[in-house]
Amino acid sequence: MEQPIHSMSNLFAQLGLPSDTASIARFIEHHRPLPESMRLSEAPFWSPAQASFLREEIQEDADWAPVIDELNADLHGSP
């Protein structure tokens, strides 16, 4: 299996969020669990630009998609 092109840290930096390991963990802990019926890009804590980026990258199955899927799973999971 190929390694993802982008890391979780890269994704958070791309979204304009603190991208160190501790900040990412705090973000996920603070915002999970998302309701199962809610798409990641529909979460209320994203800016319109962040939501658009997440939605478009998944729709296009772009090279960001694997790490966005990982974030989606982390935010939908239970603490």
Image: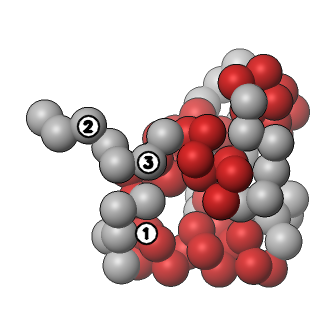
Q: Nearest to the eye among marks 2 and 1: give it.
A: 2
x and y percentages locating residue 12 in the rendered image: 68, 48
Query: Given the image, on which type of amino acid does mark 3 rest?
Result: His
Q: In which quarter of the image is the C terminus?
A: top right
Q: What residue type is labelled 1?
A: Ile
Q: Can residue 32 be seen in this view?
A: no
Q: Are marks 3 and 2 in contact (CB under 8 Å)?
A: no
The residue lying at 43 percent from left, 69 percent from top is 58
How crowded is the residue under tag 1: few (<14 C-alpha within 10 Å), some, or many (20+)?
A: some
Q: Residue at 74% across / 30% down in the picture?
A: 20
Label of residue 6 in the image = 3
Q: What element carries label 1?
A: helix
Distance CA(mark 3)–CA(mark 1):
14 Å
- Residue closer to the observer: 9 or 30: 9
Q: What element carries label 2?
A: loop
Q: Name the residue under label 1.
A: 58
Q: How crowded is mark 2: few (under 14 residues within 10 Å), some or many (20 or more)?
A: few
Q: Is residue 25 shown above or below 45?
A: above
Three-letter code for the amino acid on which mark 2 is drawn: Gln
Q: Earlier in the sequence, mark 2 or mark 1?
A: 2
- Residue that numbered label 2 is attached to: 3
Q: Is mark 3 on a helix, strand or loop?
A: loop
